[in-house]
Image (cartoon, helix red, strand yellow):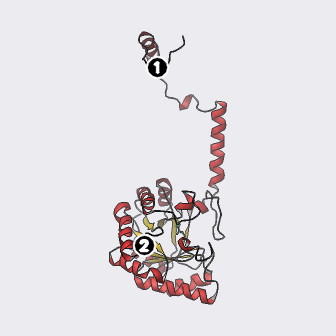
Amino acid sequence: MPKKTVFNFLEMKGKGEKITYLTAYDFPMASFIEKAGIDMILVGDSAGMVVHGLKGTVPMTMDQMVLHSQAVRRGAPNTFVIGDMPFLSYQISAQDAIYNAGRFYKEADVDAIKLEGGRRVIPQIEGIVNSGMSVMGHIGLTPQSSGQLGGFKAQGRTAETAMEVVKDALAIEKAGAFALLLEAVPPEVGDIITKTLKIPVLGIGAGMYTDGQVLIIGDMLGYFEAFTPKFVKKYANLAEIIVKAFTEYAEDVRTGKFPEEKHCYRMIEGELEKLEALLKQKPPGNLPGRQE
Ligand code: KIV
């Protein structure tokens, strides 16, 4: 299947075809996602929690995000890959934002970048778009500023706060973003924004009416165990499978059940005798003395 483009996503919205979207941080997972025919991959700064064991996303750096994006691109050469701009890579100025978005493009060959924030990051979105790159906005619950939001909490649950989310969505579309990610808002708000915007709206915890859905793979595969948000559906319990495999391996090593004959590279016939003779003639100086 050829790689989808921003125009394909627009068409999908027009036809009411749902867009599928997952996060990935490394080569193997990206290759499995591509095999499953998922439309888009986000190299999310959720890597901070899911991969690096941090409490949040704030400490993630550009170098780390570029490295993850390079691995994902190699694993999924035919999937639309989006690099997630980490905290302070775009907030300070539009110039920083353009430079760092460009790093994702030049060093990791991404198809788009994503950044968090509404009306306060419009100059950044415009700058990146005017430099020829594609931007996905991200509003609602924005983890990089979760401190200001009072934690990882659903947004837009009152008419007044929902109105602020709608205004942000409209501003992001006007600034030239090709799509919007809406996180942790009521389905009613997801529906209004999806119907109001021309660009595709992808939801995570934003209900069933958005143009597509994204989930964090650590959550949906059941291997990120620190916490599971209400909006997650678990499609597997990899943590259980992996811990079981590691436990069995340890038991096999301790009891001598692994490795077996079939896991060994035996010497070529006759070579062991030759080696024994060589060792007797001139034992290597630094080899510990062999016992006869
Ligand atoms: O970093 C991330 O994984 C995200 C999710 C909300 C999809 O932005």
Amino acid at pointer 1: Leu
The structure residue drawn at horizontal position 38% and vertical position 80%, both measured from the top left corner, is 126
Numbered mark located on residue 90 in the image: 2
Amino acid at pointer 2: Tyr
* Vertical relation: 128 (above or below) 292: below
Residue highlighted by disc 1: 287
Q: Nearer the viewer, residue 193 or 156?
A: 156
In this rendering, position of residue 23 left or right of residue 281: right
Q: Are marks 2 and 1 in contact (CB under 8 Å)?
A: no
Assign the C terminus to one quadrant of the image: top right
- Find residue 81 and report its horizontal and vertical position in percent: 43, 65
Quarter where residue 262 is shown? top right
Q: Is residue 14 visible?
A: no
- Find residue 75 and report its horizontal and vertical position in percent: 44, 56
The structure residue drawn at horizontal position 66% and vertical position 70%, both measured from the top left corner, is 230
> Residue reaching furthest front?
92
In this rendering, position of residue 178 left or right of residue 153: left
In this rendering, position of residue 238 left or right of residue 121: right
In this rendering, position of residue 64 left or right of residue 217: left
Assign the N terminus to one quadrant of the image: bottom left
- Find residue 268 and report its horizontal and vertical position in percent: 44, 21
Disc 1 on helix, strand or loop?
Answer: loop
Q: How many C-alpha atoms fall within 10 Å of the one at disc 2: few (<14), some, or many (≥20)?
A: many
Q: Nearer the viewer, residue 114 or 52?
A: 52
Quarter where residue 132 is shown? bottom left
Q: Is residue 52 visible?
A: yes
